[in-house]
Each structure stands twice: as C-alpha cells, then as structure tokens.
Amino acid sequence: MTARPDEGAGMPAHAREHVHSDAPAGKRWYFEDFYPGQKIDLGERVVTEAEILAFARAFDPQSFHVDAGAAQQSPYGGLIASGWHTCSMMMRMVVDGLLNAADGMGSPGLDGVRWLQPVRAGDTLRVRYLTRQVKASNSKPDRGVVWSTWTATNQHGDEVCTVDGIGLYGRRPTRNN
C-alpha cells in the first residue's frame, strides 16, 4: 500500500479537487493521482418520481418501488427508489465526476454495498469518493489497483448508501513509453 501523509502536496490540482466531466482536454487521472485518505466530492442530483418509477418498472418491480398506493401500506410509508437505482445514480456521478477523466481499466468487482436509508422522490443525493488503499500491480506494471468507498448522503446529511469499490487505473506514461 502506498501512503501519502502530505495529503496531496505536489499533486496536480485536478487530482486534489472535484473533477468535473468537462475537465480540460489532456488532464487525465492516473493511478499515481490516487492516495489513501483522498476525498473527492462528485456533486449532487435531485431524484425524481418519474425516474424512480421508470427504473423500478424496468429492473426492480417490487410494489414499494412501482405502486404509490401499495407503497403507502409498506414499511416505508411511501414510494422509494430501488437500491439498485441508487447505486446506478451513484455510478453515473462517479463516471461523470471522475472516470470520464481517468485512465480507467475497469473493475474486478465490489467489496460491498449497503443501503442505509430509503431514497425518495425529491431527495438530493450528494456523492463523495474516498480512496482507501492503492497498490501498484506486481504482475502488470502498466496499472494499479484503487480501493474506494463511495458514500451517498441526502439533503439532511443522512448516509443513504455506501459502495466499496475496486478500480483498475493505468500508470502515468513515462518518457520511455
């Protein structure tokens, strides 16, 4: 594991701050731009009833996701987003705020997902990315592995979902390659 006690001193500004999907051309995130303890704010979005219903009808048609009347009688007391919809919204924010500007090489999977609070229409989700661990690959020197936690909070600051992810990122090119 690589430690960075300086919390990013000497890192490019785009690696210390929120990355926008409109990052300037040529500004890429490489494996070397990640360090344990790094926090990236990926912005926020408002959840709509229309998208809750559309996602649930297509992918998770449980009554408390697709039927407002039945949802009133459920333990949730109203319509809620599918947890998978919440994860999908988080993924979109990670892609827009980070991965589109990264030399990403995919992911071998997730270490865990937790749905902590229901997400409802009108909620504002904010997603933050925390780098937990980084490790250069021994077998494939062109890449490294980044372990992260993505946390979604609502407009009240309540955590609604966490995802423990694993990402593969290319190493920064050197003059020799």
Image (cartoon, rainbow, N blue to C red):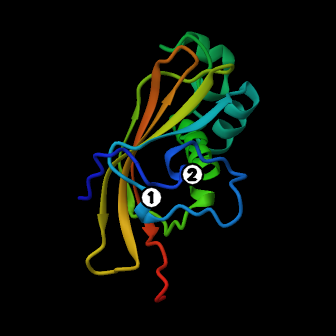
Residue 77 in the image: x percent, y percent? 55, 10
Examine the rendered structure and indicate whether residue 110 appears above or below residue 160: below
Looking at marks 2 and 1 on the same chain, the residue that comes earlier in the sequence is marked by 2
**Left-right relation of 175 to 139:** right
| Residue 86 spot, x, y in % from top left | 55, 36
The residue located at (60%, 14%) in the rendering is 78
User: Residue placed at 53% from the left, 61% from the top?
Assistant: 29
Q: Are marks 2 and 1 in contact (CB under 8 Å)?
A: yes
Q: Quadrant of residue 125?
A: top right
- Residue at the bottom extreme, as displayed: 176
Residue drawn at (46%, 80%) of the image: 174
Give the tally of numbered discs: 2
The image shows residue 40, relative to residue 14, as above or below, that is above
- SS at circle 2: helix
| Residue sitting nearer the eye, 20 or 157 | 20
Q: Is residue 4 above or below residue 159?
A: below
Quadrant in the picture for residue 1 = bottom left
Q: Report the residue that reaches farthest toward the front.
A: 10
- Pick whichever, 47 or 30, lies toward us: 30
* Position in image of residue 175 (x %, y %): 49, 84
* Residue designated by label 2: 14
Query: What percent of the width, then of the height, locates residue 152?
Result: 50, 31
Q: Amino acid at mark 2?
A: His
Residue at the far right in the pictured view? 50
Q: Which residue is mark 1?
A: 33
Amino acid identity at mark 1: Asp
Name the residue located 26 percent from the left edge and 77 percent from the top edge. 138
Tell me if mark 2 has few (under 14), some (14-19) or many (20+) residues whose alpha carbon lies within 10 angstroms of its own: some
Q: CA distance from mark 2 to mark 1?
A: 9 Å
Q: Residue furthest left?
A: 1
Task: Describe the element under mark 1 as helix, strand or loop.
Answer: helix
